[in-house]
Image (tube, rainbow, N blue to C red):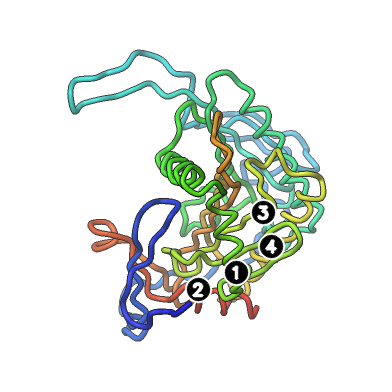
Amino acid sequence: MKMLEGAHRRYNPLQDEWVLVSPQRMRRPWQGEVERSSPPPAPPYDPQCYLCPGNARVGGTRNPAYAGVYIFDNDFPALQAAGGGEVDDGLLRAQPEAGVCRVICYTPRHDLTMAAMPQATIAAVAAAWAEETRTLMARPGIRSVMVFENRGAMMGSSNPHPHGQIWANACLPNVLARELEQQAAYFTRRGECLLCAYLAQERARGERIVAANDGFVALVPYWAIWPFETMVLPVAHQGRLDELSDAGREQLADILQRLLAKYDRLFETAFPYSMGFHQAPAAAPPGWHLHAHFLPPLLRSATVRKFMVGYELMAMPQRDLTPEAAAARLREL
């Protein structure tokens, strides 16, 4: 496949949108904001942390002395039991939205990142993700479950303790709705899964693959927006985390550990990112393929990040570093 060298745009079939790629901009000087260096290493236990074992949270609830994965209902949830009725006044519309917000602490160790955790610990986290998905999807009125993590202050994390969140919605959030529409349309049109077909192309070419094992592949999408954005996909067609076997969760743990270790080595810093698993919603057509997006903001170093402003906010996504160059740098680590 011929790669365009100058400014060009690439199509994202999951979102039905275009991304502007401008590799020539990597040569421009930078006199913008520079982030502070990484904070000093954290202790294994922080008596001020509201997620560490035995500590009290803001609302007064005390965490148990947990030794493994610990999950609890978010003390400040964005979703609650729905109340009230609809508002529909022409262009002015509103609907009640019900749901559940949970917090998952990966480990009692305050100082560990997923990249530094033993693979067995990450597999236990994956098993908890799967069980929460199964339990929440079984609740009446729940249509989708999102497992996600914001790592680092740069990505808005309110606490450095290794943790993520699980939100269950009664509706289908915007990004998932677009992905559902695109994957369903492709399956109807071609009779095969969009991401199965895409993954086959990427495995044949290899140029954007970052890491792989028998069960999962981590790659930089052809249409990536963020500089070192990656996607993690199961090799076999799977719809949700609770469909993975024990071996599948071990393979997922392996690929996550390898990918996140590469991130941390890239600029020799605790790499910030937002991560989320896109799982099949209730009553999804057979073309939905489980996948995770990793969206890290760093561009040139540990202190220079990509800003989504101006043209990106008002027109279309734009990136400077090509996905192929980003994948090559991560693959080498």
Q: Which residue is mark 3?
A: 234
What amino acid is found at the position of numbered circle 3 in the picture? Pro
Q: Quadrant of residue 263?
A: bottom right
**How many other residues sit within 10 Å of disc 3, few (<14), some (14-19) or many (≥20)?**
many
Q: Is residue 223 left or right of residue 215?
A: left
Marks 4/1 in contact by CB < 8 Å: the verdict is yes
Task: Using a 10 Å C-alpha cutoff, classify the residue at mark 4 as few (fewer than 14 neighbours), some (14 to 19) or many (20 or more).
Answer: many
> Which residue shows up at 26% across the image and 18% down it?
87
Q: CA distance from mark 4 to mark 1?
A: 9 Å
Q: Which element carries disc 3, helix, strand or loop?
A: strand
Q: First in sequence: mark 2 or mark 1?
A: 1
299 sits left or right of 65 in the view: left
Residue ID for mark 1: 263
Query: Mark 3 or mark 2, which has the lower sequence index?
Result: 3
Residue carrying label 4: 115
Q: Residues within 10 Å of mark 2 (few under 14, many from 20)?
A: many
Residue position marked by numbered label 2 in the rendering: 302
> Looking at the picture, which amino acid does disc 4 mark?
Ala
- Residue located at (56% from left, 49% from top): 193
Under circle 4, the secondary element is helix
* Mark 1 Cα-neighbour bin, 10 Å: few <14, some 14–19, many ≥20: many
Task: Check the image and report above or below for 122 versus 325.
Answer: above
Mark before the other along the chain sequence, 4 or 1: 4
User: Residue 138's image quarter?
Assistant: top right
User: Does dot 2 land on a helix, a strand or a loop?
Assistant: loop
